[in-house]
Image (cartoon, rainbow, N blue to C red):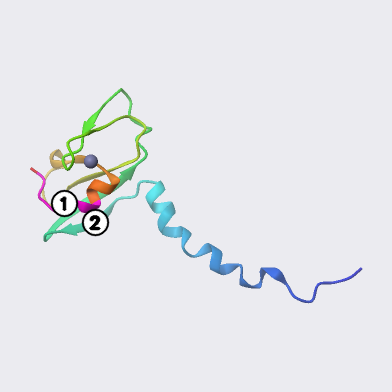
Amino acid sequence: MPRSNRPKRNRGQSDEVPELNLDAVRAGIKRIEIKNGVEYCVQTTTGARADDDKVWVCPHCHLNITKGVAHTVAWDAHRDVATRRHFHNACWKSFQGKLL
Ligand SMILES: [Zn+2]
């Protein structure tokens, strides 16, 4: 029985390292982002868990975010979660203002 003397899995480790952060995002783990010196709690959501047919209005582009659309939820870390707003993922990235 011939044996391979060059194991192919030798460098397999490099595949696994970058996955960590993605998993955290998919699981909707809360993180902190700072914009304009304001700390925001940020959470990504798939939108699939919305109980009703809730529609959010993105404060950045003023377009609707409908159920099932993956998006970003953010709120002021030093104020109440009442400041929580739903953003399109791309809109959150370009959002630089303050939550009202
Ligand atoms: Zn938007």
Q: CA distance from mark 1 to mark 2?
A: 8 Å
Q: Quadrant of the N terminus?
A: bottom right
Residue 66 lies, in percent from the top left, at 30, 30
Magenta span: 93-99
Residue 73 lies, in percent from the top left, at 25, 43
Tell me the residue that label 1 is attached to. Answer: 77
Q: Identify the amino acid type marked 2.
A: Ile
Name which residue lies at 54% across and 68% down: 14
Note whether 20 is above or below 61 in the view shown. below
Residue 49 quadrant: top left
Note whether 68 is above or below 45 in the view shown. above
Decide: few, some or many residues near mark 1? Use Cα within 10 Å; few <14, some 14-19, many ≥20.
some
Establish whether ligand 1 lies closer than 8 Å to the Cβ of label 1. Answer: no
Q: Are marks 1 and 2 in contact (CB under 8 Å)?
A: yes
Tell me the residue that label 2 is attached to. Answer: 32
- Horizontal side, residue 6 vs residue 38: left or right: right
Q: Identify the amino acid type marked 1.
A: Ala
Q: Quadrant of the C terminus?
A: top left
- Horizontal side, residue 70 vs residue 78: left or right: right
Considering the numbered disc 1 on the image, is that residue within a helix, a strand or a loop? loop
Q: Is residue 98 magenta?
A: yes
Considering the numbered disc 2 on the image, is that residue within a helix, a strand or a loop? strand
